[in-house]
Structure formats: C-alpha cells, structure tokens
Image (spheres, grey):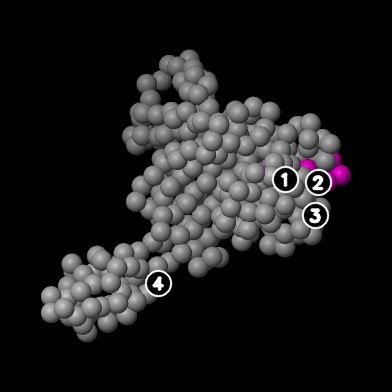
C-alpha cells in the first residue's frame, strides 16, 4: 500500500513553460490530498493522469495567487463533471469568502458541498486524523499568514507470521493482541512472546511540506525526523538579500533546515522564474545536505519504496 507525493507544480509566482506554480498530489493508501493549487493545477492533473475527482481534502498554505488561483477552475471542473462527493478545503479564513463569492456570481447550483476549515497560524495544529494518518498544520514565516503541512502515518501494527500462529493453534482473539505487540498467556498458563509470532511493523512514514517561508531555525524542530522534506528554495545564496526582503529561502537555507531536521531526503522547489534551471540550487543544497533533489513538474516520490 502506497504513500506517494507527486509534484504538480515546482515554480514560484511566475509560471513558465517548464514549471507550473505550486501544487502537489499526495496519496496515502486510498486517501487523496491536494497541497496548494496554483493556477492551472487542473491542467497538471490531466497532464500527469491524476484523477481529480478522487481528491477529498485540499490544503492551501497561504493566499498568494501562485498557491490558490487554481481553485476556482478546479472546483468548476469538479462541478461540471457532476461530482457529488463533499470537498474540504483547509486554508486562511478569508479563502471561504473569496471562493464562495466567485461561485455565487456564476449563479450555478453546485452539485457538491464544500466545507472550509480555517487554519491557525500560532502553533502546530492537528487538522485531520483517521486510523492511518495524522495531518498537522504548522506556522511558517512569510509576508502573510502561512502554514506548512505535515503528513504522518500512525504507528503500524506488527504483521502476523501466518505459519507460526497456525502451528501454535492460535485463535483470532490472540491475533489482535499480537498485532499490537503484546505478549499473550494461553489458558493453560503458557506464555507466548509476540516476537515469535509476528514480523516487525512496517515503518510509519512522514512527509512535510514547507511552502513559502524565510529561514528560521526553529522550523527544523517542527519537522524533525520527517522522512521526506519539501522546502522552498526560491533563490540561491547570491540573492540572499532578495530572499530576506521577500520572506523566501535560498537553497542553502533549505538544506540547513534539512540537515538540522535529520530528514532522509530534501526536495527543493518553488524556483524563481529568473533561473533557467535548478542546477545552481541543487549544487548549493548538496554542499550541505547530500540527499537533495530539485523538483520538476511530474516528479513522483514513492515513500514506501524509498524508506522501508
Ligand atoms: Zn509562492
């Protein structure tokens, strides 16, 4: 069962022929999430064969256009295709006014409901939870209120060793406890160690998305030990001053966060359109954190394959 992240847009504010603005598609088992929705995200869905109706939750980091201008078009397409499934959008409280206003002037009676959930910008907040996954928002430091998002699988159960449990004649009621890693005592008083009847659980995977932000050291603690880290790298060090005044990061700063957070892999993205490619960003990041990659539109990361 998968845990994948696909880059739909790897560029900053000005779209180019190479890079669409920010959007990522995250799939965890049969959950389908969209993170940010820059202009033209629905075209990226088509380009990379992502089924847009499967998306149930959308997370918008902040209200700069390159992170949410794709929403009206995407929602409109969902409506035209006759969607009935509810959609939940997490974002700044103002987002609801904006989107509802746009939909109202069109005068359509929507075929599905949209729920808006307002993000908090003062501390990390659990915003979604089910039996497999937790999703947290956490504050970043940009010119306007901005959140990053962390996707964390819950600890997984031990896997039963089918042959061993069969040989010992164990029953379903025992399986439940073994899977939780508990030892059991049979009615005849015999004690069984769970390790003799199970294989270790698959690792619980995690992914953090840090969209637009200036460098701040504490971010590394917030995303500490995440398996895969996406961090914006709008500029290279040569433009450090510009990064500071626009509340963005350089590739070197992104790599420093990666290093301090002890992540296993760093994805750089949100490259300014002034660069022809991300070669310099990547070089700069790798000098500090070797396992860095520069995002390209369409790139797919399979965390289960990479980290277990
Ligand atoms: Zn941006």
Asked whether 66 or 246 is in front, the reply is 246
**Residue 165 location (% of width, % of height):** 24, 78
Position of residue 295 relative to residue 1, above or below, is: above
Asked whether 217 or 307 is in front, the reply is 217
How far apart marks 2 and 1 lie (CA) works out to 7 Å
User: Does the CB distance between marks 3 and 2 fall below 8 Å?
Assistant: yes
- Residue corresponding to mark 1: 233
Residue 219 visible in rendering: yes
Disc 1 on helix, strand or loop?
loop
Position of residue 54 relative to residue 146, above or below, is: below
Is tag 4's residue or tag 3's residue first in the polypeptide sequence?
4
**Residue 178 location (% of width, % of height):** 28, 69
Q: Quadrant of residue 228?
A: bottom right
Name the front one of labels 4 and 1: 4
* 138 relative to 115 in the view: left or right: right
- Residue corresponding to mark 3: 284
| Magenta segment | 232-239
Disc 3 crowd rating (10 Å Cα; few below 14, some 14-19, many 20+) is many
How far apart marks 1 and 3 lie (CA) works out to 10 Å
**Residue at point 54% right, 65% down?**
307
Disc 4 crowd rating (10 Å Cα; few below 14, some 14-19, many 20+) is some
Asked whether 182 or 44 is in front, the reply is 182
**Residue 305 location (% of width, % of height):** 52, 66
How far apart marks 4 and 3 lie (CA) works out to 38 Å
Disc 4 on helix, strand or loop?
loop
Q: Determine which of the numbered discs, if any, sits on residue 200 in the image.
A: 4
**Residue at point 50% right, 68% down?**
308
How far apart marks 4 and 1 lie (CA) works out to 37 Å
Residue 80 visible in rendering: no
Q: Determine which of the numbered discs, if any, sits on residue 236 in the image.
A: 2
């Amino acid at each position: 069962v998968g845990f994948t992240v696909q880059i739909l847009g790897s560029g900053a504010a000005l779209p180019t022929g190479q890079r669409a603005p920010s959007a990522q598609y995250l799939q965890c088992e049969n959950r389908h999430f969209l993170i940010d929705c820059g202009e033209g995200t629905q075209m990226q869905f088509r380009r990379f064969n992502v089924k847009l109706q499967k998306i149930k939750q959308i997370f918008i980091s902040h209200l700069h256009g390159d992170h949410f201008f794709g929403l009206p078009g995407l929602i409109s397409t969902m409506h035209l295709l006759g969607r009935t499934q509810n959609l939940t959008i997490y974002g700044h409280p103002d987002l609801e006014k904006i989107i509802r206003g746009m939909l109202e002037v069109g005068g359509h009676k929507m075929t599905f409901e949209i729920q808006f959930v307002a993000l908090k910008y003062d501390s990390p907040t659990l915003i979604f939870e089910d039996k497999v996954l937790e999703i947290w928002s956490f504050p970043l430091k940009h010119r306007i209120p901005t959140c990053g998002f962390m996707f964390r699988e819950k600890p997984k159960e031990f896997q039963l060793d089918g042959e061993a449990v069969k040989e010992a004649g164990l029953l379903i009621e025992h399986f439940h406890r073994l899977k939780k890693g508990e030892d059991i005592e049979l009615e005849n008083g015999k004690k069984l160690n769970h390790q003799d009847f199970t294989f270790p659980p698959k690792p619980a995977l995690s992914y953090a998305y840090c969209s637009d932000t200036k460098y701040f050291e504490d971010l590394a603690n917030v995303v500490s030990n995440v398996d895969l880290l996406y961090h914006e790298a709008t500029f290279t060090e040569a433009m450090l001053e510009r990064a500071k005044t626009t509340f963005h990061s350089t590739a070197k700063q992104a790599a420093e966060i990666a290093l301090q957070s002890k992540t296993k892999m760093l994805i750089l993205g949100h490259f300014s359109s002034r660069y022809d490619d991300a070669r310099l960003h990547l070089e700069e990041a790798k000098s500090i954190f070797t396992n860095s990659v520069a995002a390209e539109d369409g790139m797919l990361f399979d965390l289960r394959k990479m980290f277990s």
